[in-house]
Amino acid sequence: SVVWRAVKIKSQNMSHMLLGLFLAELLLVHGAVEDEAPLCRILRSPEYPLLAKEGDVTIGGAFSIHMKVTQPPLSFTEKPAYLKCSSVNLRMALRQFRFAQTMIFAIEEINKSDFPLPNVSIGYRIYDNCGSTLTSMRAVMGLMNGGEWAVTKSCSGQPAVHAIIGETESSLSIVLSRTTGPFEIPVISHSATCECLSNKKEHPSFFRTIASDLHQSRALAQLVKHFGWTWVGAVNSDSDYGNNGMAIFLSAAQEEGVCVEYREKFNRAEPEKVMRVVEVIQKSTARVIIGFLAHVEMDSLLEQLSLHNITGRQFIGVEAWITADSLLTPNSFSVLGGALGFAVPKSNISGLDTYLIKDFWETDFKCKEKDKGSSSERACKVNHDLDELKEYVDDVAKLTYTSNIYKAVYAVAHSLHSVLNCSDSLGCNKTKIMESLKKVNFTIKNGEQVWFDSTGSAVARYEVVNWQQDPNGLIEFKPVGYYDAFLPPGQRFVLRTEEIMWPGGNEELPVSVCSESCRPGTHKVLQKGKPVCCYDCIPCAEGEISNTTDSTDCVKCPEEYWSNQNRDACIVKNVEFLSFTEVMSKILVFFTVFGVLLTLIVATTFLMNKDTPLVKANNSELSFLLLFSLTLCFLCSLTFMGRPSQWSCMFRHTAFGITFVLCISCVLGKTIVVLMAFRATLPGSNVMKWFGPVQQRLSVVAFTLIQVVICILWLTINPPFPFKNMEHYKEKIILECALGSPVGFWAVLGYIGLLALLCFIFAFLARKLPDNFNEAKFITFSMLIFCAVWITFIPAYVSSPGKFTVAVEIFAILASSYGLLFCIFVPKCFIIVLKPELNTKKHMMGKT
C-alpha cells in the first residue's frame, strides 16, 4: 500500500512528526476498510493542483507561492476548510509564481522540440504549498496519488508523477524527499541548499540544481577572514536550512581564526525571539553580522532593525536573501546598505523573459497590461488572485533561480530519454529514473553544463554581490566578485574590493575585532574567560622577536643575534673589545707612550751621567736593565688593545709575565746588592765575592727563566685563546682572551707577586742602613705601590665586565710601572739635574 510504505519515514522534528501522524492516520483508515473492500480510501476532499496539464509522462511541481496559512485543528478527520493560503508579500508571491511559469516554459519547450523526448509529451501538476509543512504534505500526497481517488474512489498503487520539481525551502524539501523516497520518485530542488540533504542514506531520491551550503558556509568564513573581521555576530533561521548552514560556518570560522560573539536563531512564527535578536545586536560590539536566514526570517529581522534604527552594521548574507526583491523597502537600505553575500549566478534563458512578462497575461488570463495609448484592449483585473501583481514590471534577469528550474526540468527530460532508450543489452533499468539522473550530463542552450556530483548537488558557483545605490537612488545588487569551489584552492575566490561600497556609503573597510591586531614585536596573550580573538598585546622579551602581525608567540634570536629596539627583527650583536679607536684606549695609549718617553729620558740622563758617583753607587748595569724592562712593561700594555686573536692572546699574557719578572728581578737584584754591600763592611765578611756583577746577572736571568718555563708550560698545555663571551651581556658579544688554563695565569701572577714580596722584605730590612742616599727606602716605597696595585687588581679584574677587564689589567701594568719608575729613578734624576752638588762621592758616603 502507498501509505504503508510512507509511514516508515523517520520523524526527527515537529514537521516530520506531523508527517508521521498524518500518514499513520491514513493507514488506520485504510486498515479499517480493508476488511470491507480492497480499496485505497482518501480522507476528506482530494488536493487539486494550482496548474496542471496532461501528458504521456508527468512532472510534479511544488512552490511556496503564498506564504501564510491559518492554524489547523488537531484532528485530521475534520473538514479541510482551514487550509487557506494568503499572500503576505506580493513581490514574493510573484517570484514564486514565476518559478512555476519557468517550469511550464521548459516543459512546453521540450514538447515542441525533437530532442530529448521526440513523440513523447510531458504533462505537469503544480501545487502551491503556502510555505507550510502540512500543506506541503497534502501537496505531496496529491502528487503521488493523482486525482483518480476523487473519481473512482480507488487507486492503482503507482505514483501519478515521474519526478517532482521543488521545494523552495530546505525544510519543506526534507519533508518532500522523505515522503517520496520510499517510492523512488526523484525530487529536484532549485533552491534548497541545506547540507543535510546531501546525505544519500537519508535522502536517496533528492537532487538539486544548486550547490549545498557546505561550500557557501565555508566561503562565508573565508570572506570574513579575507577582510580581517575576526569578531562577528551570527543569526540564523531555526530550521534545517539555518541550523545546518550555521553549524558548518561556525566550524569553518573556527578553522579560519574567526570568533563569534553571539549566535541567535529564531523562526518566522516566533516574533518574541526576533525582539531578543534585535536587543543582542544592539548591545554587541561586533560590527559584522552573518545572517544565515531564509528570506522570510530576514524580512522579519529587517523590519525590527529598521524600527529600532539599528544601522552601521556590516551584514554578510546568503543566497536565500541577499538578492531578494522582497527586502527592498524604503527603509531597508539604511540597515542593509553595503551588505555583502553570495548569490546564485544570473543566467539568461532565451525566450523566457518574453514568456514570463507578456505571454503569461495574454495566454493564461486572456488580457493585456494597461496601455495608456489604447483603450481597446481588455485590462487585466478582477477574477484572479494575482490581479495586483500586473502593476510590477520586474527585471526577469534578477530571478536567479529560474535557470535552476529550467535545468531541473531538462535533467528529468534527459533522464527519461535514457530510460526510454534503455535496452536489456545495455544492462540498465528501464524503471529507474533516479539512477539515470545520477548520470545526466548535458548542456542547455545558453551553454551551461548540467550534471550532479555524488551528493546529487550541482556545481558550487556563486556571485559575490554588494548592496549599493545607483545615482538615481535605486538599490542594486552589484556583483563584485565570484566564488567557484571547483577551481584550484588559490583561484576559487576573486574579489574586486575597490568596487565595494560599505555601510553608510563609506569607502573605508569597516573594522570588527575584539582586540586590535598585535603589531610585530608583540605577541598575543589570551584574556581569561574570553574567546581566542580577545587578547592583550604583550611586547616580546629582550632577545626575542615577532616579525608578523598577531603573532601568538615570540621567537628567540640565534645565539649571535639580538632583538632590535622594536623587537621585530634579529640583528647581529655588537662585538665588544678594547679597540684603539675608543677614547679609553686613546687615554691608555697616551700614558703608555708617555711612560716610555719618561723611561727613555731617565735612561738618557743616566747614560749621560754614568760616570757620576750617584749612578755608579746605584749599580748602573742593573739600573739600565731595569729601565729597559720598564720600557717593555709600558709597551706590553699595547698588546692588550685591539681585536683579540689566537696569537695576540698568547703573546699579551706571556709578554706581560716575562717583562714584569725581568723588571722585578732587577729590583730584587738591586735590593740584594744594597743589603749585601753593607753586610760586606763588617770585619771578616766576604759576602760580596758571592754577589758580584756576574752573580747579579745570573740571578736576573735565573729568575726570568723560571717565568719563561711557566709561560711555556701554560702555552703548551692550555694556552689563552680568543673567546666570544655571551653570558655576561645578552645584548652584545664580548670578544676577549680566555685564559685557557686559569692555573697558568695565576701561576704567572703568583710568581711575580712572590718576587715583589721578596723585594719588599729585603728593601724593608735595608731601609735604615747608614747612607745619605739609601736606595732601599725608594725600593720599599715602589714595592708598596706595586703590591697595592696588584692586590687591588685581583677583585677589579674579576668583577669588571667586558673590555673593562682589559682596561683594569692595562691600568695595573701602567700604574705599577710608573710606581717603579718614579720611586726608584725620579729622586736620582732630581739630584743629577737639579742638585749636582750632591752628586759627589763624599756625599754618597755620608762624610759631608
Image (cartoon, rainbow, N blue to C red):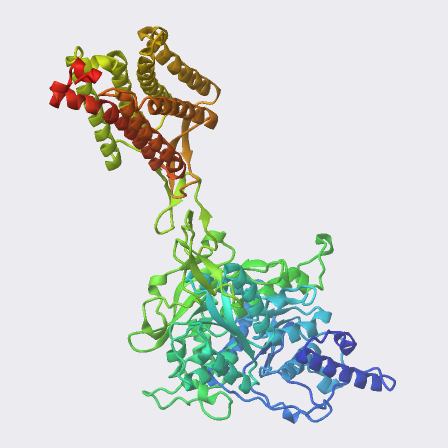
> Which residue is situated farthest in the front direction here?
683
Q: Which of 275 and 377 is in front in this view?
A: 275
Q: In which quarter of the image is residue 146?
A: bottom right
Q: In this view, does 480 lie to the left or right of 110?
A: left
Q: In this view, does 186 lie to the left or right of 331?
A: right
Q: Position of residue 816 (x, y in %)?
A: 30, 28
Q: From what the image shows, is residue 730 above or below residue 244?
A: above
For the N terminus, the quadrant is: bottom right
Viewer can see residue 113: no
Q: In this view, does 804 lie to the left or right of 153?
A: left
* Total marks placed: 0
Q: Where is residue 194 in the image (x, y as percent from the top left)?
A: 59, 69
Q: From what the image shows, is residue 317 above or below residue 839?
A: below
Q: From what the image shows, is residue 612 above or below residue 545?
A: above
Q: From what the image shows, is residue 663 above or below residue 575?
A: above
Viewer can see residue 583: yes
Q: Position of residue 520 (x, y in %)?
A: 39, 54
Q: Which of 769 and 479 is in front in this view?
A: 769
Q: Position of residue 292 (x, y in %)?
A: 52, 72
Q: Is residue 575 left or right of residue 250?
A: left
Q: Residue at x 52, y 68 (%)?
A: 530
Q: Which residue is drawn at 59% across and 60% down?
A: 452
